Amino acid sequence: MAAMSLWLPEGDAKINNLIVPLVLFPLIWACVFFYVLLERKPKRLYLTMLLLFLVNGGLVGASIMGWLS
């Protein structure tokens, strides 16, 4: 949730990059939580979580480097 405010674009009111992650956080957390509980193959689970981590990290890194202006 904290990283999403870095790469989400600001809206007209300049607060959308803060409000959207705050609203989406429970939904994202619930999806990940239930995916972890329901996935039967640990290898696919670890790869999916690693992919999500790398995508989010890449978006944050691109935002910090100024590539997502």
Image: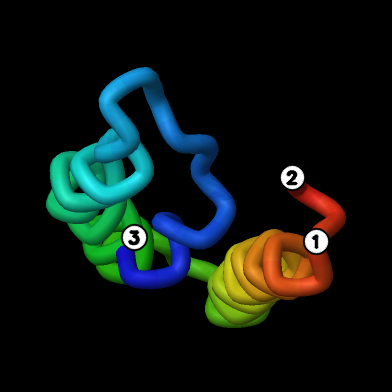
Q: Residue at x 53, y 37 (%)?
A: 9
Could you tell me residue 59's position as x and y percent?
A: 69, 60
Residue type, label 2: Ser
Q: Quadrant of the C terminus?
A: top right
Q: Quadrant of the N terminus?
A: bottom left
Q: Earlier in the sequence, mark 1 or mark 3?
A: 3
Q: Secondary structure at mark 1?
A: loop
- The residue lying toward the viewer, choosing from 47 and 14, is 14
Could you tell me residue 12's position as x and y percent?
A: 36, 19
Q: Which mark is residue 32?
A: 3
Q: Could you tell me how far apart the alpha carbons at marks 2 and 1 are, in whole angstroms?
A: 6 Å
**Residue hosting label 2:** 69
* Residue 14: quarter of image: top left
Decide if residue 15 is on the left or right side of residue 53. Answer: left
Q: Residue at x 17, y 51 (%)?
A: 22
Q: Characterize the local packing of mark 3: few (<14), some (14-19) or many (20 or more) Cα atoms within 10 angstroms.
A: some
Q: Residue at x 70, y 62 (%)?
A: 63
In this rendering, which labeled residue sits more in front, label 3 or label 2?
2
Decide if residue 23 is on the left or right side of residue 33. Answer: left
Residue type, label 3: Val
Question: In the rendered structure, are the residues bearing label 1 and label 3 in contact, judged by CB atoms less than 8 Å apart?
Answer: no
Could you tell me residue 57's position as x and y percent?
A: 66, 74
Q: Secondary structure at mark 3?
A: helix
* Residue 54: quarter of image: bottom right
- Judge whether 9 appears above or below 66 on screen: above
- The residue lying toward the viewer, choosing from 67 and 47, is 67
